[in-house]
Image (spheres, rainbow, N blue to C red):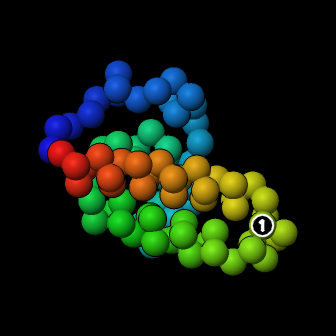
Amino acid sequence: MRSNTIKDIPSQESREKWFKSHLLAREVELKELYEMPQEDLDLLMAETAELRSDLGNRERNIGKFCTAGYFLELARIIDKRRIEN
């Protein structure tokens, strides 16, 4: 697996966008996903998928619901690339 560097991160993902993960017990920035250990990425995918699966979360907090979607989709892309490499 090749390690990505900051220059490999698209500019739209370099802007501060974070998700407060309870499983990781910290706030995670979107750009951190590229360097995140696989175990942490798995936990983040599980947490964001669970949040997205409950449509009531959309009504309660649309911002967190959408942010979880961004993190989940990017994590899936990164996960797929890691498997392919």
Q: Quadrant of the N terminus?
A: top left
Q: Position of residue 40 (x, y in %)?
A: 33, 63
Establish if 15 lies above or below 25. above
Name the residue rendered at 82%, 70% in the picture.
60
Q: Position of residue 63 (x, y in %)?
A: 75, 55
Label 1 secondary element: helix
Residue 62 found in image quarter: bottom right
Q: Residue furthest front?
A: 84
Q: In this figure, what is the number of numbered marks?
A: 1
Q: Quadrant of the C terminus?
A: top left
Residue 25 appears in the figure: no
Residue 55 appears in the figure: yes
Establish if 76 lies above or below 85. below
Name the residue rendered at 22%, 49% in the picture.
84
Establish if 2 lies above or below 12. below
Q: Position of residue 21 (x, y in %)?
A: 51, 64
Residue 66 found in image quarter: bottom right
Instruction: State left or right for residue 53 relative to residue 41.
Output: right
Mark 1 surroundings within 10 Å by alpha-carbon count, few (fewer than 14), some (14 through 19), many (20 or more): some
Q: Residue furthest right?
A: 59
Pointer 1 residue: 58
Instruction: State left or right for residue 6 relative to residue 3.
Output: right
Instruction: State left or right for residue 54 relative to residue 20.
Output: right
Name the residue rendered at 44%, 64% in the picture.
44
Q: Amino acid at mark 1?
A: Arg
Name the residue rendered at 42%, 55% in the picture.
76
